[in-house]
Image: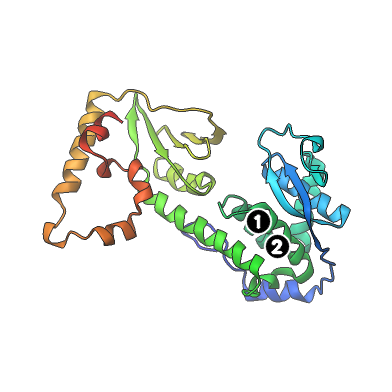
Amino acid sequence: MRKDTGVWIMDSAAQNQAAISRNFRAVIPPVTPDLVYYYDGTWEGWLCCVYESYMAREIPGDVLADGTGTKTAEENLFYSKVIKHDMEKSNRVRIGIADKIGHGFLRILQQVFCSCIPHKEEEMLLFTHKGFRYGMGILNMRQDTVVKNVLKGLHELGREIDKWYGFVRFSDVKGILVAVIGAKNNVLPFIASHFCDRYRNEKFMIFDKNHNMALLYRRGERAIVPVEDFTLPDLSEDEKQYRVLWKSYYDAIEIKPRHNDTCRRTHMPKRYWDFLTEMTEQNSCVLK
């Protein structure tokens, strides 16, 4: 596990050997291309998809999130299934994965679920079937397409977590620190501990506009909650002035003869610039 991001990349050799020694012989059913699972978009809902796949001894061609949870099989293709959220089934799958494959494998699935790789639910389902077949040794099968995609998701998630550690910019709004981010991956569960520890005596909110989620914190309490719409309130004159001063400082410390846009975009990708006070135009910075 990487200590800086908390993202699990590879289990220890001892744990791999222990998993392999269990000698799993779970049969992996063929993929049915015309079959689609629809679920409610939650982690527990996806675990219910795993339950259905094992009970029906089938692997769908795709697993799609229906965030409203209102789709019915009649509205979709003939070979579609709507998987209902069932805590008893999800708990059974979660415990089964942890006991029969390992807690590390379960953590990998939880982290990939927060990533933005294409068709992640289907990749995770295939990865789980192979995990029951081969144990933690599946992580050593780097040439397997499913394994490569899962590890790619972990890598992209960990890289973005690193970026947001340094690119979150707070504004003081009536005594509360407020920041807006636009993450590709669902990074809030992973950066929460860092900012709650760093600003333990403050009240703050970090709003992820791409996922409509917000991290709320006050001393001793924190929560990640859904937020449908959020607009940064009008800023005080002091906050506007601090923004101007920060941008002036950023511009002043640059060594002009060493200006290198390519290097800057490498370390500070352009998609983050809209959320950085120092990278906005001065007027926008004041009024944003």
What x and y, as percent, mark residue 4? Answer: 46, 59
Q: Amino acid at mark 2?
A: Phe
The label nearer to you, 1 versus 2, is 2
Figure disc tally: 2
Identify the residue position indicated by label 2 in the image.
127
Identify the residue position indicated by label 1 in the image.
109
Q: Residues within 10 Å of mark 1 (few under 14, many from 20)?
A: many
What x and y, as percent, mark residue 89? Answer: 81, 45
Say whether marks 1 and 2 touch (CB < 8 Å): yes
Q: Residues within 10 Å of mark 2 (few under 14, many from 20)?
A: many
What x and y, as percent, mark residue 283? Answer: 22, 32
Looking at the image, is mark 1 or mark 2 earlier in the sequence?
A: 1
Residue 143 placement, left or right of 178? right
Residue nearest the observer in this picture, 243 or 280:
280
Which image quarter: residue 84?
Answer: top right
The residue drawn where x is 47% and y is 34% is: 217
What x and y, as percent, mark residue 248? Answer: 16, 42
Residue 64 placement, left or right of 9? right
Is residue 96 positioned above or below 139 on the image?
above
Residue 152 placement, left or right of 200? right
Is residue 178 positioned above or below 137 on the image?
above
The residue drawn where x is 78% and y is 53% is: 34
